[in-house]
Amino acid sequence: MNKLLSCAALLILLLGSCRKIQEDVIIHQGGSGSDSAEENTVLEGKISSDRTLKANYVYKIRGFVYVVNGAKLTIEPGTVIKGEKGSSTRGALVITRGCQIIADGTADKPIIFTSDQANPQRGDWGGVVVLGNAKTNASYNGVQGIGSVEGGVNTAEGLGLFGGTNDDDNSGILRYVRIEYAGYAYLPDNELNGLTLAGVGKSTTVDYVEIYKANDDAIECFGGNVNLKHTVFISTLDDDFDTDNGWSGNVQFGIVIRDSAIADISKSESFESDNDANGSSLTPQTSGTYSNITVIGPRAALNNAGNSLFLAAAQIRRNSSISIFNSVIMGFPTGVLIDASKGTPTDNNITANTLQIQNTVIAGCNVAVDYAASAAPTGWDKDAVNKWFLTGDFGNSILTNNSDVLLTAPFDYSNPDITPKENSPLLSGASFSSSKLSNSFFSKVSFKGAAGASGDDANWWKGWTMLDLNL
C-alpha cells in the first residue's frame, strides 16, 4: 500500500466514529505499487466542487452522498456506480438544490447505478435523489412551497429540502441511465425510491431511464414540473409513477411490466397520484399529463390471482388532476380508480375537465373503471364514471382479455415484448388534439401505447434496458 493510501486509511479510521457528514471524503483503493491503476473509488460524505466519474473505474456510494455548494457531478457514458448495502445505512446519491448531475449515457454505453452485492436484491441501496427549486405545494416548518424529501435524507443543514419559485430550474441530465435494486423504507410511508425527483424543474432532462426492481416506487415526483420521456419500469414493489405535492410535468413513452408475485403492503399501482397527503386544494395542483404508456399488470388472464396487494393500474385520488392519453392498461384487478374518498373530491376535476382520459385501452381487468365516493355526495358514482370514460368523443375502449390487444409477448417474464402485432388495436387511433398535449415535448405519433410496430418508435427500449437484455 502506498503512502497516499495509508493516509487515506488512517483518515477513515479517525472519522469512522463521527456521525457528522464529512466534506469530500473520497477513498481510492488501488492495486499494489504506486503506479497501479485505481480499480475502485468509494464516495462518501459531500461533493462540494465539480467532479467527473470516469468510465474506466467502478464507483461505490457509501451512505448518503450529497452533491452540494452548486457543484456539478458529471458521469461518463458506460460508468458503473454501486450503492453499498451497509449494516446500518444504505448508499444513496443526493443532488441538492442548486447542483446538477450530468449523467448523459448512450444506448451502447448506458450509465448503470446498481447494488454492490454479489447476489443483488431489491432494496440493497437507497437510489438517486434529485432536489430542485421548482414550485411545489409542500410545506416545511411553516414555510409554504418548501418540502423535506422522504427517506431520512434531510440534515440539520437542510440538505434534504426541495422546492422554490423557479419552474425553469435545471438539475442536469439523466439520459440512458439504469437504476437497479434501489429504494428502501426508512420509516413506514417515508421511503426512498429508485429515482426521487423533488421540486425538479422542466429544464432538467430525464430521458431513456430504466428503473429495475425498485423496493418502493420506481419514480416519485414531489412537486416540480420535470418531464419524463422513454422510461422503463420492471418489477417495481409499490408504484411505478407516484406523483404528488403539485407535480405538473409531462410523460411520454413509458413501459411498465409488473411481477405478479411482487406487490407492496400499501397496495401497488402503476399510477398513484395525490395533490397532497390531505387531498387539499393547495396550488400548484398535481396535474401531470401522460401519453403513450404501456402498462402490463400482474394478471395475464382474468382468473389469475397473483399477489393480493395489487389494487388498480391507476388510482387517481386526493384531488389529483393528472390525465392519461393514447395508452394501454392491461391485467390489473382494476384498470382506473377515481378515488374521491379523502379530501377535496377528485371527481370535481372531471367536472372541470382538468382530469382527462382519452384514446386509452383498458384490457384484461376484472373491473375496468371504478369509483370510491366521498363522504359528501358529489353526484358521481361508478356508473357515472364508466359513462364518462366511454364518452364517444374520448376514443377510449374496454377489451375483455389481454389477448385482444395483440401484443407480441407482454406476459413472458423471461423474454417480454410489448411490440404490437399486425391488426393490434394499438397501431392506430392516437390523438393529440387535447390542449394538454399541445406542448412541443410530445412527439405526435399514430399509435397508442409505448411502441409502434416498426422503426425507431418500436425499438427505443432495445439494447440498453434489462427488459431487452434479460440480464
Image: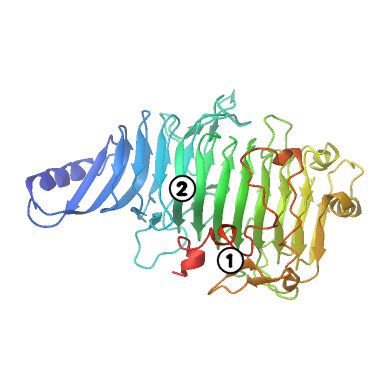
Closer to the camera, 61 or 290?
Answer: 290
Mark in front: 2 vs 1: 2
**In the drawing, does residue 338 fall left or right of residue 383?**
left
| Distance of label 2 from label 1 (alpha carbons) | 27 Å
Classify residue 2 as left or right of residue 111: left
Per the image, the residue denoted by label 2 is: 175
- Mark 2: which amino acid? Arg
Viewed as shown, does residue 418 lie left or right of 434?
A: left
For the point 59% across and 57% down, which residue is it?
457
Instruction: Please tell me which residue is depicted at 50% across the width and 37% down the height of the picture.
Output: 204
Image quarter hosting the C terminus: bottom left
* Tag 2 and tag 1, C-beta contact below 8 Å: no
Residue 292, horizontal then vertical, whole percent: 66, 53
The image shows residue 25, relative to residue 166, as above or below, that is below
In the image, residue 153 sits, relative to residue 265, either above or below, namely: above
In the rendering, which numbered label is found on residue 262?
Answer: 1
What's the residue type where badge 1 is placed?
Answer: Ile
> Element type at marker 2?
strand
Q: Position of residue 440 (x, y in %)?
A: 63, 38
Residue beneath the point at 28% across and 36% down:
22
196 or 450, nearer to the observer: 450
Q: How busy is the neighbourhood of tag 1: few (under 14 within 10 Å), some, or many (20 plus)?
A: some
x, y percentage for residue 17? 26, 43
> With 384 as the anchor, is 366 left or right in this view?
left
